[in-house]
Amino acid sequence: MRFPMLVRTELRRLTSSPMSILALVALMMVPVLYSGLYLWGNDDPYGNLDSVPAALVVDDEGATQDGEDVNYGEQVRDDLVDDGTLDWQVTDADEASAGLQSGAYDFVVTFGADFSRSLTSIAGDDPSKAVVEVTTNDANSYLAGTIADTVTDTVRDSLTQEVGEKAARTLLDSLATIRSGLNDAADGAAQLADGSATAKDGADTLADGASQAATGSDELASGLGTLNSSAATLPDQVSQLNDGAHQVADGNAQLNAQVAPAAQRIDEAVGRLPSDDDIRNRLSEAGFSDDQIDLVVGIVSPLHSDIANANGEVQAAAGAVQQLADGSAQVADGTQQLSDGMPALADGIASAATGATDLSSGVHQLADGSGDLASGLGELKSGSRELSDSLADAVTQIPDQSEDERATAAAMMSDPIAVDTDATTAASSYGAGMAPFFISLAAWIGIYALFLIIKPYSQRAVTALRRPLPITLGAWATPALLGAVQMVAVFLIVAFALGYSIAQPVAMIGLMALTSITFAAIILTLNVLLGSVGQFLGLVLMVLQLVTAGGTFPYQTLPTPLRALHEVLPMSHSVDGIRQLMYGGDMSRAWADAGFLAIWLVVALVAAFLAITRMTRTRTLRDLRPSLIG
């Protein structure tokens, strides 16, 4: 009996009656129903979140920001309701708590009274974090908490961006103001540097002048000291001068008193002298002849002229004496005033000498101080120039941004990273992402279910034929063929009924078939070696692979012992291989996974072959009894 005959015999047995056919069809449909219904039910769970009931409680009292009233709690409420991602129900705290307890709401999101005030506190002296309170009830749904966390993370990111943008805009506006002020300060510092340079030059000139003034004040003090020594005898000398002046004035007054009357009498006498005409008339009346008259007039006339001239000189001398008397009186008055003022002058000169000494000391202090001033202004000049340069450098360190540029920069500061998502391979939906795992699991379940009605091997062939290789191949070929048919049906469901995109359809069918026939060989070997116990171990092995295959979470998240099992168990490689082919990944990895499955296939068949070989050599009566699994 050859192994094709064994396959036909087993297939005839499986289809020998309507109930057998029904049982075979039902078991053949197990992987199709499992993978199809599960993938259909989980095709797009995130697309149906709008049916998830969630309560939204807004107790926010609002706040004032930049002179405007804001209420971020109401803003978020409106955004969430308009977005419609979840079935949001706006309610109060009591109703939300009761609804969460009763299951009317899966979770509750609450914005407290201080929500807006906390968000706007970033601009104040006492900033505090705003709190979004999320209340869940795992008795309603454990994953609802995860959904709530996702929603609140989105809310937090959105508010963080908005509030951060406003805070950054305020900061940038302040920096712009500071930059303008620094620019003005730099200009002022430059002017200060120029002014301090001019002041330094003036201070140098002042220092030179003060030094010269100190020298002059020393000379002045010395001269006034000498003058003060000489002025000490001046009052006595001036007093003597005053006495002499008074004596001269008295003498001149006496002289004038004597000269003035005599001069007056002379003048009167001269005034009484007859003129030439009077003489002529008188002589003519006396009977003198003209010649005699002429002779007399000739003699008298010159004398008359001389007497008149002498009178003029006498009158002039009398006037001079009068002037001398008046002048000497004035001199006496002046010397009297000089004598009276001389003690005060002497005291003034003494005070001036003392003041000159003090002035000299002060001018020396001025010279020293002006020198220090010049030195300090030199440092001021250097420091103000350094300040000007530093302020100018500081201005260049602050960006010179326009209002639009500050708005753009504030938006970038609040949300500095743009995520550019690019996938080398991508699943079309959540269900498509889970498909490789559930296809592999369906392949195992399908083969496992088939062995509920398929005989692991023909006992009659083992007893009569005693040819282990055809018996092994015949025992494996029947479930392998049916498993391959199951995988084709599953592929049709995935590709057409669910409409998932498949990058390498032909290769994927081949790998799915290889997966199924490998699982058939493994479960066959377990049944051949251990019988009913082997069938149970097939269930245990399925559970173990369900955990370690890495179908839902990355296998790296597994505990270390389970991570080692991931590397060696076949379902891990079928999941990875189907992913590569379904999403258009690395073909070399797909070939490696196929090779790993082929190794499991060969090893399992060899183990089954050795077990059946041993059976053909050691037959017992037990081998003729019906098997517990058919």
Image (cartoon, rainbow, N blue to C red):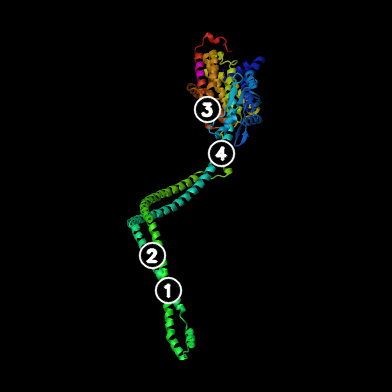
Q: Residue at x 58, y 18 (%)?
A: 448
The amino acid type of the residue labelled 3 equals Asp
Within 10 Å of disc 1 (Cα), the crowding (few <14, some 14-19, many 20+) is many
Dot 3 corresponds to which residue?
593
Residue farthest front in this picture? 286
Residue 24's place in the image compared with 233, above or below, is above
Within 10 Å of disc 4 (Cα), the crowding (few <14, some 14-19, many 20+) is some
- N-terminal of the pair, mark 2 or mark 3, is 2
Dot 4 corresponds to which residue?
170
Location of residue 101 in the rendering, given as x and y in whole percent from the top left corner: 62, 18
Q: Is residue 187 left or right of residue 449?
A: left
Q: Secondary structure at mark 4?
A: helix
Q: Residue at x 57, y 45 (%)?
A: 402
Dot 2 corresponds to which residue?
250
Name the front one of labels 3 and 1: 1
Please identify the quadrant where the C terminus is shown: top right
Residue 270's place in the image compared with 578, above or below, is below
- N-terminal of the pair, mark 1 or mark 4, is 4
Q: Secondary structure at mark 3?
A: helix
Q: CA distance from mark 3 to mark 1?
A: 166 Å
**Which of 28 and 253 lies nearest the eye of the viewer?**
253
The reply to whether residue 81 is in sight is yes
The amino acid type of the residue labelled 1 equals Ala
**Which of 195 and 325 lies nearest the eye of the viewer?**
325
Specify the segment rendered in magenta. Answer: 605-611
Q: Secondary structure at mark 1?
A: helix
Q: Is residue 610 magenta?
A: yes
Q: Which mark is residue 263?
A: 1
Q: CA distance from mark 2 to mark 4?
A: 102 Å
Q: Which mark is residue 591?
A: none
